[in-house]
Image: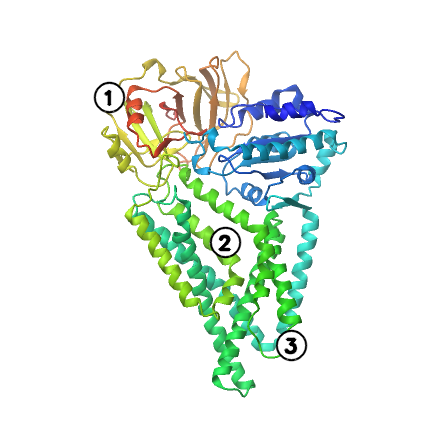
Amino acid sequence: MLELARSVSQSAHGFKNSIIFLFNTGEEEGLNGAHSFITQHPWSSTIRLAIDLEAMGAGGKSSVFQAGPSPWAIENFALAAKYPSGQIIGQDLFTSGVIKSATDFQVYKEVAGLSGLDFAFADNTAVYHTKNDKIELIKPGSLQHLGENTLAFLLRVASSSDLSKDKTLQEEEKANPDSAVYFDVLGKYMIVYRQSFATMLYVSVIMQSILIWVLSVFMGGYPAVVSLILSCLSIILSWIFSVAFSVAVAFILPWISSSPVPYASNPWMVVGLFVSPAVLGSISGQHVAFIFLRKKSSNRNSNKLQVSPRLRDNLARLEAERWLFKAGFIQWLVLLAIGTYYKLGSTYLALVWLVPPAFAYGLLEATLSPIRLPKPLKLATLFISLVVPILVSSGSFIQLTGTMIGMLIRFESTPGGTPEWLGNALIAVVIATLLSLTMVYLLSYIHLSGAKTLLVTALCISTALSLSLVASGVFPAFTEDTARAVNVVHVVDTSGQDQVAFISLFSNTPGNLNMEAEQIKEGFKCGRENKIDFVSFEAKYSCVTKKDAEVGWDKHNIPVLRVINDKERDEGRVTAISMDTGGSSRWTLRIDMEEIEDFTMQVSEDEELMIARGEKSSNEQGWHQIQFAGGKKAPTSFVLKLYKKEEVSDEKKKQRPLLKLRTDFNRLTPQVQRVLERLPPFCSMFGKSTSPFTLAFLASLPCTK
């Protein structure tokens, strides 16, 4: 950003708009920096466009993964950027909630109502939020790519007279949204068009496709209807077999490997572990449908044609091949219709996988071929069918798969809260789905090529060899560069009747920690019985030791929750509570909203309210969560006023506290220091906004009667 500021300052001639470079902190603590600027800084009212520079990895291209709501920013970026990179698939995943994360861009868009762009590096996602997230991984080419694209865009925006200067116009745009669909082609060109145009284009293609299919089936009569149904069956079977074969491997991995994710440090292993079974499944599913199609065509030909049985069988095989190819049209047509109905930005993928193959088939197989007995599909048809879809979408699919594999390192937001096979199963389903979708045209050629037996054998060998490598441990699941994400925390728990201190070891990476605990040799006992409620999350599996845990921390750091008074007032029953964090300026508090109607919070009763009365949100369990992170002069004592509900039904009354508090200290106790020194090199400390520091205190306040 400093280099961008320097370059912009040297080019600031004829600017019609100012550029503010915002260096903020507190993003991991709850987007605090961005929120403070938008809600408190006097310049915030002058902002008309927001550009967020993010990272969910280290290195690679800096790509646009969120844009809008107004299409103006992405349209101008596509015109200005030298090497535009961006895919609306990421935006669809964020919007759908599949990716449960947030960036500063959410604050700019949702709180300030701004439009703009959100950039991110997405390579090496396995090192994100670990000690291996090093500046060395961001190559000069990555920074150059981000700098050149962003600088060109900033200069264009600053000189533009089209940028809205009136918030009234922005409100009108929000009232009548027309978002953009965008994607790049090989990082050289970016295609952008409005959603209104996309809807018109997609509906046109859908209507024409339906018309062609209706006429085709009408002219073909009953046999065409049967073949169409069997073609749909081939799609369903291909999907079912592909997913089933891949997921089966996902279930096997935890049984034969010391880690449920043995390919974490060697992502290429997914080719043998998941890609080969998925392709094998697709071939198997199509083969079953191919047999039915061939049999049906053979019976029909025997009634119409006076030819030898061998020729009749060959004709049936050729006709079955064509129907398997055309099954791809049906598959992508259905996805195009669904995407159009829900106005998904990534619907363009269905369009590019439908139109070129349909055009190639109509040009080379239907239009130019004489109307007589079926012939083998031409290789030119396959080439023309796949060249455009592969150019447009292959990079996105590979990047999506690679990012998901890297994210397995921190897959479990609640350590031990999911089955060990679940992460593998998700990867398997994604790979199988993508392969079933994209290989439908290619696989239709295999059944008559004579290479099916050889290909099936090669796929089986590939899968068996990969499983053997996993079982042998030749390639370690984790290395020093791609390490397992772990946390070592000295916990002092005062939430129960007795004060308990212990050292906790847990991981966001799937799998047990028995091997790590054995290497550390500090008396750790691992299991699901060692559940720890860290307020912001619960570690349902951890390793715990009490060795020397009663020393190394100060008693005056223990947080205190105390009832000051509990009275009936005009507004109902009000309970005043004093909260002393014991000197901690980073804490997490949860309030049981099933017991109370509202609450306020302030430093003292004479101070201004930090949190005023009003509607409060809560999660599925009925907890409202507050995260606080301050500097050296941040307050450590607070007063809460809880406004109780008039009556709580017996069904809602639970044996759980009214308040739960965790305070954190970024301090290494001697015990934690000793554990960290003995931590295996393939483990790395993990940290994010909800993670505790190396010293954490737990406290709670029971419900008052």
Residue at image location 39% in from the left, 61% down from the top: 458
Q: Would you say the residues marked 2 and 3 are in contact, meaning their CB atoms lie under 8 Å apart?
A: no
Q: Secondary structure at mark 3?
A: loop
Residue at image location 37% in from the left, 60% down from the top: 460
Q: Earlier in the sequence, mark 2 or mark 3?
A: 3
Residue 170 visible in rendering = yes
The residue singled out by tag 1 in the image is 548
The residue singled out by tag 2 in the image is 434
Q: Earlier in the sequence, mark 1 or mark 3?
A: 3
Q: Residues within 10 Å of mark 3 (few under 14, many from 20)?
A: few
Quadrant containing the N terminus in the rendered view: top right
Q: Would you say the residues marked 2 and 1 are in contact, meaning their CB atoms lie under 8 Å apart?
A: no
Q: Position of residue 40 (x, y in %)?
A: 61, 20
The residue singled out by tag 3 in the image is 370
Q: Secondary structure at mark 1?
A: loop
- Which of label 1 and label 3 is nearer to you? 3
Closest to the observer, 164 or 369: 369
Quadrant containing the C terminus in the rendered view: top left
Q: Amino acid at mark 3?
A: Pro
Q: How many marks?
A: 3
Relative height, residue 557 to residue 698 (above, below): above
